Image: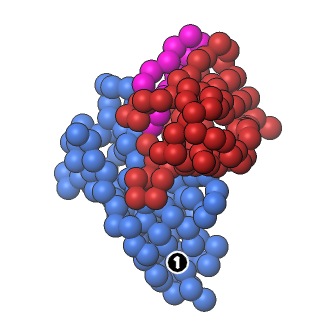
Amino acid sequence: DAEITQSPRHKITETGRQVTLACHQTWNHNNMFWYRQDLGHGLRLIHYSYGVQDTNKGEVSDGYSVSRSNTEDLPLTLESAASSQTSVYFCASSEGGSYGYTFGSGTRLTVV
Amino acid sequence: QKEVEQNSGPLSVPEGAIASLNCTYSDRGSQSFFWYRQYSGKSPELIMFIYSNGDKEDGRFTAQLNKASQYVSLLIRDSQPSDSATYLCAVTLSGGSYIPTFGRGTSLIVHP
């Protein structure tokens, strides 16, 4: 069965370190997205991609980057982790805007 | 700025009752409307989508859309304790990026 997987499930890192969160989907979806979810803010879009070599900034992209070298993967990199980036991160993929998202299981990141 | 508003709740209903969850949106150009269910500690899961005015039924779930009044509702009939979760409303515009704007969610508690 097709799926979307995120790794790691939990991560603790120190302030200033570079961290990469993985997202891999086997739906063959062109559209992939990264969100963070925090109490009081709901889901906020970090970056998204419509296909290989395409990346776009979302509403909270500062301090984050993504790259898309193939259809299956959209890794999210925190260049220099900050305590404000402690959050739950969700990756999602979609066949198109009218079809809704399939979400990964999430990564809980703690920056100490 | 696009806004999607939901009452945070919690909405508490007895088992077997109808739960009514509401969502209002600010952009009249909105075209696609989604409801996601998110259990505590889990990722959001798409349960319904609706594009046209009126009702759309799927099992115990009914989505209702009224574009003139700019609201979309989710009705859950014969509510079960297993329906206890946070319900997220998401709305997309036409002619744009099709990136949905999410509401912050309504917490539903179904008590036996």
Q: Chain of mark 1?
A: B
User: Is A44 left, or right, of B31 in this rendering?
Assistant: right
At horizontal 60% and vertical 78% (from top left) the residue drawn is B80
Secondary structure that dominates the magenta span: strand
The span shown in magenta is A45-57
Question: In front: A103, or B17?
Answer: A103
For residue A107, say whether it is visible: no
Near-viewer residue (A75 or B37): A75
Chain with red colouring: A
> 10 Å neighbourhood of mark 1: few (<14), some, or many (≥20)?
many
Provide the residue designation for mark 1: B109
Name the residue rendered at 55%, 58% in the picture.
Answer: B37
The answer to which image quadrant residue A95 occupies is top right
Query: Can residue B104 be seen at all in this image of the molecule?
Result: yes
Q: Nearer the viewer, residue B64 or A45?
A: A45
Q: Position of residue A9 (x, y in %)?
A: 72, 46
Q: Horizontal and vertical percent for residue B13?
A: 48, 83
Label 1 sits on a secondary structure element that is strand
Answer whether residue A22 is magenta in the image: no
Snapshot quadrant of residue A101: top right
Q: Is residue B58 above or below residue A37?
A: below
> Which chain is drawn using blue?
B
Which residue is depicted at the point 63% across and 60% down?
B41
Quarter of the image with the N terminus of chain A in it: top right
Name which residue type carries label 1: Ile
Identify the residue at image location x=41%, y=35%.
Answer: A60
